[in-house]
Image: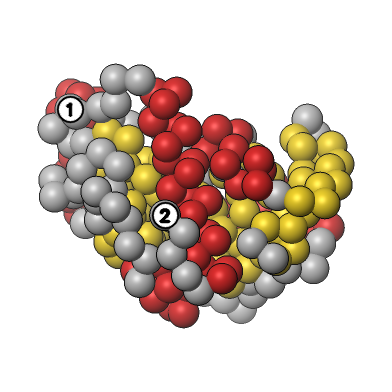
């Protein structure tokens, strides 16, 4: 079974509307919905913002259901200047940019693990799922592979310009987009041996570009993500 998770309800509202045979349960103020989407049985949930919320929700869903794959989807800010609002970045890999134990000789983003596992830094999306995403055609925009950075801070181009150390960190990590949940969700999937895919729609750019009507943008982004996931499940382009 596949689980589709976002931080905000609006990021997956188009999927919820199209689901059939819905059964929902409440867990720690979150609504976990099971139903049919594009002919497949899926789990849909909103984790809440931030790394801890994402990790909690992903682990609960893995423990509660027979999950084979987690899709974490939503919006993100661009770090790569070639990206425009509405473009989609599919994470080839992701890193938690705000994990920093460089004082002990580790590269930024490195997470020490129990002795049996050593250390991890880069979490990769499932290669076969990534290929499917990159085969999808997005009218009026592009779908590109990239490195997504995750941290417990809301980041904009203006914030980056005001904090030179942040700009330096992002350049060091060669990030294409930045958000607040993906790599934490990926770490939980890594620990559980679950395949993972992280996909983000760009909502603002490094130069300061941002959407004028956020509600409309969230709705259109949700529709893009819905069509993309339908394409992955059915193997055909719905948009």
Please tell me which residue lies in front, 168 or 139. Answer: 139
Q: Is residue 22 left or right of residue 239?
A: right
The residue at the point 67 percent across, 53 percent down is: 58
Label 1–label 2 contact, CB within 8 A: no
| Element carrying mark 2 | loop
The residue mark sitting in front, 1 or 2, is 2
- Crowding at dot 1, Cα within 10 Å, few <14 / some 14-19 / many 20+, comes out as few
Q: Mark 2 — residue?
A: 239
Relative vertical location of residue 30 with respect to residue 6 in this rendering, above or below: above
Q: Quadrant of residue 130?
A: bottom left
- Which numbered tag is attached to residue 6? none
Percent coordinates x, y for residue 120 in the rendering: 46, 68
The residue at the point 86 percent across, 41 percent down is: 25
Q: In this view, does 78 lie to the left or right of 229?
A: left
Q: In which quarter of the image is residue 174?
A: bottom left
Q: Mark 1 — residue?
A: 208
Percent coordinates x, y for residue 213 in the rendering: 35, 20
Relative vertical location of residue 40 with respect to residue 167 in this rendering, above or below: below
The residue at the point 80 percent across, 34 percent down is: 28
Screen quadrant of the N terminus: bottom right
- Asked whether the viewer can see residue 105, the reply is no
| Element carrying mark 1 | loop
């Amino acid at each position: 079974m596949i689980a589709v998770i976002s931080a905000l309800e609006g990021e997956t509202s188009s999927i919820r509307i199209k689901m059939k045979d819905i059964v929902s349960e409440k867990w720690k103020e979150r609504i976990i919905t099971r139903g049919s989407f594009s002919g497949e049985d899926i789990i849909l949930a909103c984790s809440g913002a931030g790394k801890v919320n994402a990790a909690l929700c992903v682990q609960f869903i893995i423990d509660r259901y027979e999950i084979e794959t987690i899709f974490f989807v939503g919006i993100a800010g661009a770090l790569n200047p070639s990206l425009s609002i509405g473009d989609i970045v599919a994470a080839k890999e992701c890193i938690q940019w705000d994990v920093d134990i460089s004082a002990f000789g580790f590269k930024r983003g490195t997470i020490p693990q129990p002795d049996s596992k050593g250390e991890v830094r880069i979490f990769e999306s499932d290669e076969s799922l990534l290929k499917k995403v990159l085969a999808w055609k997005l009218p009026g925009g592009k779908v590109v592979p990239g490195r997504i950075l995750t941290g417990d801070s809301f980041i904009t181009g203006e914030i980056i310009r005001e904090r030179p150390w942040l700009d330096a960190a992002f350049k060091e990590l060669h990030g294409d987009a930045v958000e607040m949940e993906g790599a934490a969700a990926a770490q939980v999937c890594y620990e559980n041996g679950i395949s993972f895919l992280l996909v983000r729609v760009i909502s603002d750019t490094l130069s300061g570009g941002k959407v004028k009507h956020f509600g409309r943008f969230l709705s259109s982004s949700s529709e893009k993500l819905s069509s993309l996931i339908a394409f992955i499940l059915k193997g055909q382009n719905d948009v």
